[in-house]
Amino acid sequence: PNRIDPADLLAVGDLLTDEERLIRDTVRRFADERIRPHVGEWFERGVFPARELAPELGALGVLGMHLDGYGCTGSTAVAYGVACMELEAADSGLRSFVSVQGSLAMRAIHAFGSEEQKQQWLPEMAAGRAIGCFGLTEPDFGSDPANMRTRARRKGGDWVLSGTKMWITNGSIADAAVIWAQTEEGVRGFVVPRGTKGFSANDVHGKLSLRASVTSELVLEDVQLPADAVLPGVTGLRGPLSSLNEARYGILWGTVGAARDCYTTALDYAKTRIQFDRPIAAFQLTQQKLVEMMLEVEKAYLVALRIGRLKDAGESVPAHISFGKLNNVRAALEIARSARTILGANGITTEYPVLRHANNLESVLTYEGTGEIHTLVLGQAITGEAAYH
Ligand code: FAD
């Protein structure tokens, strides 16, 4: 009692329920034992062993965790959030895998798919036996997906898709790709199975960020699909955008984990690293950095928890998610960079997580709506004026 935990000085964790804490601790143990010892090497080699890890993540119950039925855990938004926090404390690539699988691919099928599509894909994806991806972004259209060029046209009872998607997480390893395309009726989603004729993937190389994650270009050359490949439940950009809202929710929690990991790594390091005959933690300038980090980690945690509770109460709106995504990614990035300075030269290697987190967070800042786009969402929410065009 009354003992201060430097990793959570305000004891925000005490605001979690017993069940949420259990999930947090279980996912943290998995990440510490299964991911942390290897992820520096995966990052350096630019690989993510998805086939091996997916069934383990399935057994852990984090794939499609917040969805109901079809083999999914059906947990609360806050429980899903704390799982994302612990996954991203290990690496943003791991959390990205889980976000894309559960919040994008599975969620789109769950919300908009036919009963047959749900039966076919969701239990397999929840167990990690099948991997999903979500193709919205194109080489020429990122922030502005309404202008996408990928087209789906009807041919008899079938659909024919053509176009190119870019920057697609899990793209080349996916068993099922949810692809968004322009049709005569508006934007529609399609489930494209791996190996469909005319459908191919090329991995993006030379990434300096999110290296422990597969990122691909998807090429669709007159890909012919049966009538039942379309997601029947939605027409228009609401389909992809509502899915993105779910994934962004995971990000605003995940980045708290990455930030906490940077802060606690810097704190531990500062207490044992001796310069000028004293631990560097004893210098005022170092303490100031550590205190700033700690304040921002705790504030981000509170923001995440508040948004999670709103979501569980059915009261969250997209502006809440933009608030969390913008604030928490930005805070995490600053914390990671500051932590890096405390580690000195050691901070630039993969032996410590801080620069890996900082580099990963550059992707997290850009994907799922850039910092600028979330600023505009919030600007519109508070002024009533849309400033995108
Ligand atoms: P652009 O849209 O070209 O933006 C460039 C710059 O211009 C940004 O700073 C942006 O904020 C700014 N800008 C654009 N419009 C405005 C405006 N109106 N006002 C002010 N500033 C503006 N996409 C998927 O569909 N599926 C995935 O699985 C996926 N995974 C990804 C994984 C990684 C590692 C990365 C890096 C990206 C991934 N993406 C994915 C793509 C990501 O969502 C896009 O990169 C993102 O939407 C930004 O688009 P863009 O890169 O084309 O940048």
Image (cartoon, helix red, strand yellow):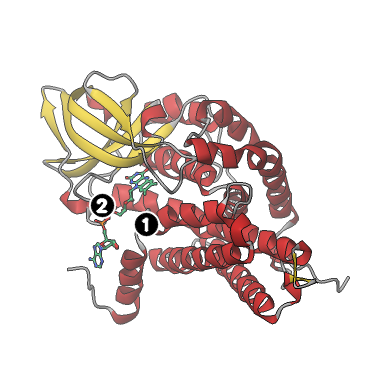
Pointer 1 with pointer 2, Cβ within 8 A: no
Please say whether residue 171 is visible from this viewpoint.
yes
Q: Which mark is residue 366?
A: 1
Task: Judge left or right: residue 153 versus residue 207.
Answer: left
Label 1 sits on a secondary structure element that is helix
Mark 1–mark 2 distance (CA, rounded to whole Å):
10 Å
Judge the density around disc 2: few (<14), some (14-19), many (≥20) Cα neighbours within 10 Å: many
Judge the density around disc 1: few (<14), some (14-19), many (≥20) Cα neighbours within 10 Å: some
Depth order, front residue of 78/88: 88
Residue 114, position in %: x, y? 35, 32
Q: Which picture quadrant has residue 7?
A: bottom right
Please say whether residue 316 is visible from this viewpoint.
no
Depth order, front residue of 345/255: 345
Label 2 sits on a secondary structure element that is loop
Mark 2: C-beta under 8 Å from nearest atom of ligand 1: yes
In this figure, which residue is indicated by the disc labeled 2? 142
Residue 243, position in %: x, y? 38, 49
Q: Report ligand 1 position as a quadrant.
A: bottom left
Residue 167, position in %: x, y? 32, 43
Which badge, 1 or 2, comes first in the chain's sequence? 2
- Identified by mark 1, the residue type is Thr
- Tally the numbered discs: 2
Task: Judge left or right: residue 53 versus residue 152.
Answer: right
> Which residue occupies 61% across, 47% down?
90
Q: Is residue 342 above or below residue 97?
A: below
* Most distant residue in the right direction: 1
Mark 1: C-beta under 8 Å from nearest atom of ligand 1: yes
Q: Is residue 125 above or below residue 86?
A: above
- Identified by mark 2, the residue type is Gly
Q: Which picture quadrant has residue 293?
A: bottom right
Quadrant location of the N terminus in the rendered image = bottom right
